Amino acid sequence: MQLSIGDLIELAETGKTGNIELDSMAKIVLYECSNMLEFEADYYEREKKRNAR
């Protein structure tokens, strides 16, 4: 089964999508991965703006 980005977002937010349900440890890991990706995206945008000056 392949998951779309929407499925991954739903998993991160609710812990389940379709016929997949995550256990508590998987929910924590996916949530933290999501946080790291958001941090990296914010950092990239800040660096892009800083380097454009």
Image (cartoon, rainbow, N blue to C red):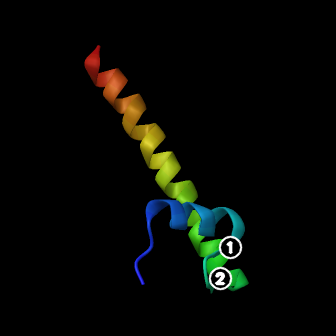
Tell which residue pokes out farthest to the front in this image.
18
| Residue named by callout 2 | 22
Please say if the residues under marks 1 and 2 sit with CB atoms less than 8 Å apart: yes
Image-quadrant location for residue 29: bottom right
Q: Give the position of the C terminus as an image quadrant.
A: top left
Q: Which residue is mark 1?
A: 15
Q: Could you say where residue 35 lies in the image, as x and y percent from the top left?
A: 57, 55
Q: Position of residue 18 (x, y in %)?
A: 60, 77
The kind of secondary structure element at disc 2 is loop
Classify residue 1 by image quadrant.
Answer: bottom left
**Drawn side of residue 30 relative to residue 3, left or right:** right
Amino acid at dot 1: Gly
Residue farthest to the top, as pictured: 53
Instruction: Say what amino acid the circle numbered 2 marks.
Output: Leu
- Give the quarter of the image for residue 14: bottom right
Residue 12 vertical placement versus 20 (above, below): above
Q: CA distance from mark 1 to mark 2?
A: 5 Å
Tag 1: Cα neighbours inside 10 Å, few (<14), some, or many (≥20)? some
Q: Residue at x 52, y 66 (%)?
A: 8
